[in-house]
Structures are given as C-alpha cells and as structure tokens.
Image (spheres, rainbow, N blue to C red):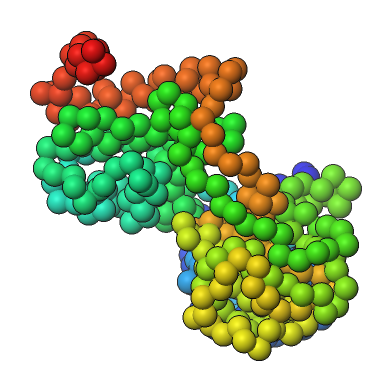
Amino acid sequence: MGKILIIFLTMISFLFSSVEVKELQWPKGETFITFLDKYGIDQKFYFDLEKEDKELCSEINADTWFYLYENENNTLNQVLIPISEEIQIHIYQDENNDYKFQTLPVDYYELSETIALPIKNSVAYDLQEATGDAMLAGQLKSIFKDAVNFRKMQKGDFISINYRIKTLMGRPFGMPVIDAAMVQINGKEYFRFRNLDDDKYYDEKGNGFTKSYFFSIPLTYSRISSHFTTKRYHPVLKRYRAHLGTDFAAPRGRKIFAAADGRVIFVGNKGGYGKTIIIQHSNGYRTLYAHQNRFNPKIKSGLKVKKGDHIGYVGNTGLSSGPHLHLGLYKNGVAVNPLKVIKKPNTKSLEGPKKVAFINSIKQLKNELISETQKENPNLPTKMDRLTYKNDLEI
Ligand SMILES: [Zn+2]
C-alpha cells in the first residue's frame, strides 16, 4: 500500500508541477494495443496482463481525458487513464525501465451544493446555465418521471436541488448525482430524496417511485467465475483490482439471450472483450455481452430486441481464459453491478424502521431545499402558511 501511495503521490505532484505532462483525449478508434504500439511497447505487455486487467483495457472510452508523461527521448514514462468514476489505469516505468501496470483510485474532488432556481426559460436551459452541467436536467426529469410534467412548468415555478459533481483536474468528471430535489409548480411542491440504504428515490413520506428494471440473467451458467468490483484493494496482491461486469462460466456454444427489451447498438469486435454485442435499454441502461463465440446472424446493429431473444453463443474470443459470458451493465455510461440490478426487488414504499430512518435522514436536506427557494423568492408561503394550506386541503 505504502509504495503504491508514494508512486501515486509522486505522479500527482508532477502532474501539478511539470509542464511536460500532457493532457490528452483518447482518440476515436484507438485501442489499448495501438496505444502501446505508438510508444514502442511490446504487445507482450498487454498479453501478460491478468484477465480482469485486459477487460479493463477494453473499457477505455473515446474522448476520455488522460494524462501522459514522456521521457526526454519521447518514450513513455507514465500514463494515467481513467476508465470509470472510481479507477484509472496507471502504466509506469519501474527502476529497470520495465513497464508496469496497476489500477489506482481516481483522485477526484467532489463538490456538493444546494441551489434553487426560478424557471425563466426551460428546466434544461436554466439548470445548465446555473450549474454548467448538461446532464443534471435529464437526471432531474427521470426521478420525477410520471409525477411532474416539466413542459408545463412556467415562469414563477421553482426547482431546488442538492447535487454532487466530481471534478478531475478542474474538469467535470463522471455523472452528477442528485441527492434531493424539490419542484414547485403553481405553488405545489413535489419532493424526491435519494435513500442511501438502497440508492432509490422516495418522496418526503417514504413513498417509492423508482421503477424496477426487469433484467434477467442472459444464459444458463455453470458458475460465476468473476464478480463485479469497481475498486477493491487486494491485500495479498497489494494492489487495486477492478472488474466492471459479472463473468458467467458456461460451455462454448451455450445460447446467450437479451437481458431486457432494447435496441442493439453494437455488434462486433471490441478489444479484449472479443465478439461483443451492446444493447441500449430504456432509462439510460445498456448491457454488454462479451467474448462470444459467434453471433446469432439475425442480430444487426439498430435491431429492436425483446427480453429473451437469442443474440449469440458463449465463447472465448478476445482475451479470455475459458468460455464465459462477461456481462456488463451501464447506467448512463457508468458501470454498475449487474447482479444488484437483476436482483433488485420491485419498488415499494418504505416501511417500519427503514421509513423512520429515511424520514429522519432527509429532514435537513428538505429544509435546505425550502430555504434556498425562499431566498430566491421571498413571496413564497412560509412553512406555517403551507401547513394551513395543506390542512385546508385535507378537510
Ligand atoms: Zn469479465
């Protein structure tokens, strides 16, 4: 641990102090192998990596900002490539100038704030103008889905949110997270709070709204050969490990089925993932099926599929140690644990001690949302006014 931290801190310190560190965007079409070739690093370096690490190298997204430090003779000294919100690949030269691979936690800053906005143009426009983040409006809409029609919002209506956003080297990084939100339309308030316990949204009374997603396990498998981990320190290997999916061991040729309804958006080879299909589902979910032996020839990019449709066959393509299906699940581009979503129970309202704990936990945030809105709009009814109004309604 000590050594890794020292290397990491050294990396960070020269990132900040030296002008020789390049900030680059990962080019479209660049693969991990073509990147190594550019720097004259033998492909053996890649082929000697562990299975999980090879898969991580296939997770690098085009346009990702990464940080690179070259030696004087333009050979690679070190490079840091973020591959998720939590981890990054670090390739560096050791004291013998041999290249080494490790995964490190991403050293991001997280900003949290509560803001209230009167609607002037549209929710999307006003929210982006106030926060600089283009993704918040979509998230806000998704957590109020079915309850609030944002198109009906008018001047004089309000939104108030408490959100967190990560920044890396001064740039917004990853997805913002809304912890609490209030929408006020025509004087009526709607609340949503994220429950830390199950990562779902509830209103101020603990009523649930998050729809369940009916993903099914896409094959009959022998066993799970590797579980999902975003960032885990391995005490024996003394390094960080990550595996952004679930590996299901199964015989070669076993049929693979779509885990849910959706549209096929990728059919082809994807680096260490080998023959891969990606399906886009509703609500920002994507599933990825890697290492296939072959595809069902009917499956083409753009095709709509139903849950349970046969899409391909288990194989060993790409870099895989034996026939298995690597299933990746992404929510708005962020890898999440497939088993957690598959096993997620149907959404119900909170009850008993969980409800009490939730209602206690949101008190402060709820007051913040209301007080921020009142700062923006001194004409807003006071708490007492609202209570009276609500009582009137109930009579
Ligand atoms: Zn895997």
Left or right? Give the position of 241 relative to 298: right
Judging depth in this view, the residue of 290 and 100 nearest the camera is 290
Above or below 159: residue 176: below
Left or right? Give the position of 296 relative to 148: right
Residue at the bottom extreme, as displayed: 297
Residue 361 x %, y %: 49, 21
Above or below 299: residue 343: above
Residue 273, quarter of picture: bottom right
Residue 74, quarter of picture: bottom right
Judging depth in this view, the residue of 165 and 382 nearest the camera is 382
Determine the residue positioned at 66% across, 88% down: 297
Residue 262 x %, y %: 53, 68
Residue 98 seen by the camera: no
Left or right? Give the position of 350 relative to 146: right
Left or right? Give the position of 9 relative to 243: left
Residue 202 seen by the camera: yes
Determine the residue positioned at 54% across, 34% down: 348
Q: Quadrant of the C terminus?
A: top left
Determine the residue positioned at 86% across, 52% down: 237
Above or below 353: residue 36: below
Q: Quadrant of the N terminus?
A: top right
Determine the residue positioned at 66% across, 52% down: 342
